[in-house]
Image (cartoon, rainbow, N blue to C red):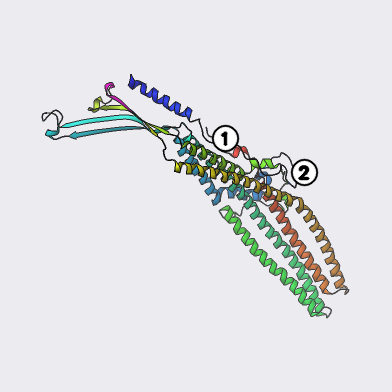
Amino acid sequence: MMNRRLPARALAISALSLALGACSLAPTYHRPQAPIPDRFPVVAAEAGQAELPSWRDFFRDPRLQALVELALKNNRDLRIAVDRVEEARAQFGIVQSDRLPTIGAMGSGQITRAPADMRNGGADASSVSRSYTAGVGMTAFELDFFGRVRNLSEAAYQSYLSTDQARRTVQLGLIAQTAEAYFRLRSAQVLHGLMEQTLEARKGTLDLVQSRFDVGVASDLDLAQAQAQYDTVRADQIATERAMAQAGNALQLILGMPVPDDLPEPLPFGREQLLPSLPAGLPSQLLERRPDIVGAEHDLMAANAQIGAARAAFFPRISLTGLLGFASPELDALFGGSHRYWQFSPQIQMPLFSGGIKGNLDLAKARSNIAVSAYEKAIQTAFREVADGLAGEATYSRQLDALRATEESALRALKLAQIRYETGVDSFLQVQSAQIALYGVQQQFILLGTDALFNRVELYKALGGGWSADDLPEEAA
């Protein structure tokens, strides 16, 4: 009867262990209060609870959409981040397995020949003895009375979730890097086009001055100044060709492959054509959107669970080892009912000198404090990045409008200067000054427009980049 009751006892012990495992010495987790204001200092008209578009909706340019797709498939940094998620998942599986018994099957056989003077039963007894065993055993299963294993498992799970958020951070950063590299290349191409147009205009001016010089109307100084203006733009054009090549190389590195030739046709280069405006939302939404903040909170939860595991180390650890099987001197009779046997070995470990254990608890508490500070800093950093982006959104449009008006005035001034020079009213110096002013404003307008694009991309990233709860792994059972 005792033999038959053993499996039931083992099941009862396992159930008791699982029930007691619900007891935890970890501190009750409370999310720290966000150390930021309730609203951003510069609030857009769309401020309030608002959802961000996905990156496919945010990037309107079909060529950029194709490039982002390629980067997400081939970028090596993202591959590393994905592999680290799998590593953390495997580590969680290892720790989680400690919460369940380890069951194994065993079988053995032994044949022994003894000398005549050492045989049981005297010299006439058989010289060969045999023994066979087979059974199922449980090895050193810890009864988690104080939640040590449970808290270690929880810490590993939270670390896994944090690693997955780190992967999302890399992914969001990669999307932004791809867009910025693409816009940098487009900006260099637009600048190169501007310089081609400017060179053509400078060549016309140089030819005009040369013809006037040939008939004695223009001076050597006028001709030298016109030539210098032409050469300056030509030098700028060469520098832009270098910038185009370097931007293409940077984009290729981000993609993890050569840039294909069969990409879709791009949209015209301009912020409003390429990117929609963004709803700022509320600072509290950053706690749910930003993967670095979500990851920092998972790190904090992991550190909180580690405190529970460190506290449990002060209490006894009880583990069970058991074996249920058969033993027989004859192999063909091994599984007979009369050959059953069992073994049950509970073990208790009680800490006596707990200096190291106390040190581990102090270490866990210190790491928890560090995690709190890291979480708060992540929130403050996110708030600052969003505030900077909103400040850019509030000023870039007005600055671009001012530059657009400046460009119109500079173009009108150049036309007047050319007329006055051709009619002999002013010297070529006035034309030169007007050309330099217009050329500078046109370059500044393109560069400022590119900066405005970068700002909107960075704001999109700072806001969390179209976060969705579906992106998160499922909760552990």
- The residue indicated by pointer 2 is 45
Q: Is residue 159 above or below residue 117?
A: below
Q: Where is residue 320 drawn, in percent x and y?
A: 38, 31
Q: Where is residue 139 drawn, in percent x and y?
A: 37, 33
Point 45% across, 26% down: residue = 16
Q: How far apart are marks 2 and 1 (CA)?
A: 40 Å
Point 21% across, 34% down: residue = 111
Point 34% across, 32% down: residue = 105
Given residues 364 and 140, the one toward you in this image is 364
Given residues 158 and 184, the one toward you in this image is 158
- Residue 455 is left or right of residue 211, and the answer is left
Magenta-span inclusion, residue 337? yes
Q: What residue type is disc 1 on?
A: Thr
Q: Where is residue 274 drawn, in percent x and y?
A: 71, 50
Q: Where is residue 463 drawn, in percent x and y?
A: 67, 45
Choose the circle earlier in sequence order: 2 or 1.
1
- The residue indicated by pointer 1 is 28
Q: Which of marks 2 and 1 is in front?
A: 1
